[in-house]
Image (cartoon, rainbow, N blue to C red):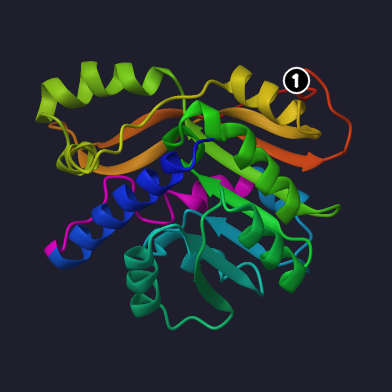
């Protein structure tokens, strides 16, 4: 990755969350945690030893992080944006939760965190697709450091069909969601990653897939029929094996 690329990404997210904190805007993806992480929980909790800390990567204002604290004794949310972490801290009085400003692409900071807490589980909801392709390898490497030998990672990402859903369903029904418009205004252009691309990425960095399936990412956007907009998504539960392959070995997929 280039030296300036991560800095631009950092500045863009800082600008977005600073504006959200002063303008009182709620991000598009900041849904009720019972519909967010609460829906995801069934896919990953049986694979995770509750004795390890759990990291919420890209935690934003901590909405999903606080839910996780009811199920794990030690939860750490981290985000590249100081403004996001400030919001999360102000909204949290839950024991066993802490927040850090940390860039997942900062290898030194990631190594230091692992040295402090040891192996950890990871929950990641919609972070990978916001990173440019040249940063995907660094993302996978950082997660590997955090997981160590015992951690398990769950990630849920918008599927490639999500863009078509926005164009065909969201935009005609309600116009471009304000939350998405604000992301674009701050120079954040969501990319995309498919299930097969994710399996290839993590397979080449020594992961295996324990569980995978199709699902949705709930949003705060309400359609004219009264239903919440739900982006098509896929989810993976992963662990490190240390053996690199061209792709993760795929378990039987869940159909959810």
Viewed as shown, does residue 182 lie left or right of 209? left
Q: Residues within 10 Å of mark 1 (few under 14, many from 20)?
A: many
Residue 59 among magenta residues: no
Residue 203 place in picture, x, y as percent: 76, 27
Residue 175 place in picture, x, y as percent: 10, 29
Viewed as shown, does residue 21 lie left or right of 146? left
Asked if residue 35 shows in the view, the reply is yes
Measured along the vertical axis of the image, is residue 15 above or below residue 244? below
Q: Seen from this angle, which residue lies furthest front?
A: 3
Q: Looking at the rendering, in which quadrant would you find the C terminus? A: top right
Q: Quadrant of residue 19?
A: bottom left
Residue 54 place in picture, x, y as percent: 65, 62
Q: Identify the residue shown where x is 62% and y is 47%.
A: 42
Q: Identify the residue shown where x is 27% and y is 58%.
A: 17
Give the camera-side residue of 49 and 119: 119
Q: Looking at the rendering, in which quadrant would you find the N terminus? A: top right
Measured along the vertical axis of the image, is residue 256 above or below residue 96? above
Viewed as shown, does residue 165 lie left or right of 56? left
Secondary structure category for the residue under label 1? loop
Viewed as shown, does residue 153 lie left or right of 19? right
Q: Identify the residue shown where x is 44% and y is 57%.
A: 80
Measured along the vertical axis of the image, is residue 86 above or below residue 254? below
Instruction: Report the magenta stretch's main SS.
Output: loop
Count of numbered marks: 1
Residue 26 among magenta residues: yes
Q: For mark 1, what is the residue? A: 247
In the rendered structure, which segment of residues is drawn in magenta?
23-42
Q: Identify the residue shown where x is 46% and y is 36%.
A: 131
Residue 91 place in picture, x, y as percent: 35, 76
Asked if residue 30 shows in the view, the reply is no
């Amino acid at each position: 990755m280039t030296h300036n690329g991560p800095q631009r990404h950092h500045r863009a997210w800082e600008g977005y969350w600073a504006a959200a904190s002063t303008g009182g805007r709620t991000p598009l993806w900041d849904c009720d945690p019972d519909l967010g992480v609460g829906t995801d929980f069934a896919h990953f909790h049986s694979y995770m030893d509750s004795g390890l800390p759990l990291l919420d990567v890209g935690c934003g204002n901590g909405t999903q992080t606080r839910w996780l604290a009811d199920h794990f004794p030690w939860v750490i949310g981290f985000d590249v944006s100081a403004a996001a972490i400030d919001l999360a801290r102000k909204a949290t009085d839950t024991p066993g939760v802490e927040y850090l400003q940390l860039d997942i692409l900062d290898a030194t900071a990631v190594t230091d965190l692992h040295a402090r807490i040891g192996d950890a589980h990871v929950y990641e909801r919609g972070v990978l697709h916001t990173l440019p392709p040249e940063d995907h390898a660094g993302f996978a490497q950082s997660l590997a450091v955090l997981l160590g030998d015992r951690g398990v990672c769950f990630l849920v990402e918008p599927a490639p069909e999500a863009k078509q859903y926005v164009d065909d369903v969201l935009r005609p029904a309600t116009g471009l969601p304000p939350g998405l418009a604000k992301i674009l205004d701050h120079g954040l252009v969501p990319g995309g990653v498919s299930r097969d691309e994710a399996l290839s990425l993590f397979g080449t960095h020594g992961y295996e897939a324990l569980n995978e399936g199709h699902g949705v990412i709930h949003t705060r956007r309400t359609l004219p029929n009264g239903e919440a907009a739900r982006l098509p998504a896929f989810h993976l539960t992963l662990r490190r094996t240390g053996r690199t392959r061209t792709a993760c070995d795929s378990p039987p997929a869940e159909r959810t």
